[in-house]
Amino acid sequence: MFPLADERARGEASAPQALYSIVFDGAEVWGDDAPLPMSIAADLWDVYLDEVSP
Amino acid sequence: MSAHDHDHDHDHDHGVHESGATMASRVAALVAKLEAKGLVTSAQIDGAVEAFLAKAQPANGAALVARAWKDPAFRARLLGDANAALDELGIDMTHWARVKLRAVENTESMHNVIVCTLCSCYPVALLGPSPTWYKSLAYRARVVREPRAVLEELGVKLDPRVEVRVWDSTAELRYVVVPLRPAGTEGMSESELAALVSRDALIGTAVCASPRAE
C-alpha cells in the first residue's frame, strides 16, 4: 500500500492504495513490430486501473 | 571508462545537457530560497548528501548478489522481501524516506533491465550515484521501445529466445537485477564473486563475465 504519487506531488493528503506491478507483453504495447520476446513491467496504482467487463 | 559510457556521454552532450543545466539552476534557486528563509544552510545540505553518498556504492548491490549466489536461502529471501534481505546485510536504503526494493532475477529464459521512464528513480544506496546515460532521454525512451537493440549496443548479446523484461521504476518501488552467476565460479568466495558484479549488471545493461573469459 502506497500513497498516490499524483496527490503527494500536489501536496495533498493521500490515502495509501495498492500498487501493482503489471507485466504487459511487448506485443500488447507495441503491436506487430515489438522486438519480441519482450515485456514491460509497470507499477500502477489501483486508481489507474479500470475494471474490464468479464 | 568503457566505450559504452563514452557513447552515452556523447549522447548526453547533444541530448539532455540543457535539461541538466536547467535542473542544476533550479536546485540552486531552491537552495538559495531555503537559505534566505533560514531553513537550511548549504553546509547542512552538503553534509547530508555526503553522508548518504559515502555509504551508497555499487559494492552494496554486488555484496547482495554474491550472497544470493552463495546462499540459496538468502536468495529466496532476497527475491521475496528485498528490504529484509538488505537489513540482514546491514545495508541501509533509507535516506530521507524508506524505499521499497524489489530484486528481479535473471534466468536462462529471462533477462531483466531497469529504467525510470518518468525521471531517474534508481536504487542509489545499492548502486551509487546513477550514470548520466541512465537519466538520458535516449535510454529512458529507447529501452522500453527497443530493449533488445539497446542491450545489443551495450554489448549484451542475448539468445533470441530469451525474453527481455523492462522494469519501470516509480518513486515508491526501486528495482535491482540479480544477474546470472557466470560459469567457472563454483569455488569462489563471496568477496571474489562480488568483484564480478558490475554496476551495469545490477541495472541489467551488462552481464557478469566468467573469470576464465577475461
Image (cartoon, coloured by chain):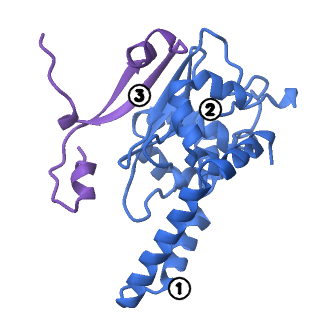
Chain colours: A purple, B blue
Question: Which residue is the site of mark 3?
Answer: A41
Question: Which residue is the site of mark 1?
Answer: B43
Q: Count residues near mark 3 (Cα–Cα under 10 Å), then give few for <14, some for 14-19, many for 20+.
A: some
Is B94 left, or right, of B114 in this rendering?
A: left
Type of amino acid at the residue the image marks with label 1? Ala
Please determine whether, in this image, residue B137 is positioned above or below residue B143: below
The secondary element bearing badge 1 is classed as: helix
Cα separation, mark 3 vs mark 1, equals 40 Å
- Residue at position x 57%, y 14% in the image: B109
Give x and y (percent) for residue B175. Answer: 47, 40
> Is B19 or B192 nearer to us in this picture?
B19
> Is B180 or B14 nearer to us in this picture?
B14
Give x and y (percent) for residue B163. Answer: 54, 16
- Residue B69's disc number: 2
User: Upstream in the sequence, badge 2 or badge 1?
Assistant: 1
Is A26 left, or right, of B133 in this rendering?
A: left
User: In the rendered structure, are the residues bearing label 2 and label 3 in contact, judged by CB atoms less than 8 Å apart?
Assistant: no
Type of amino acid at the residue the image marks with label 3? Ala
- Residue at position x 77%, y 30% in the image: B209
Please determine whether, in this image, residue B127 is positioned above or below residue B69: below
Residue A42 figure quarter: top left
- Residue at position x 58%, y 46% in the image: B136
- Residue B7's disc number: none
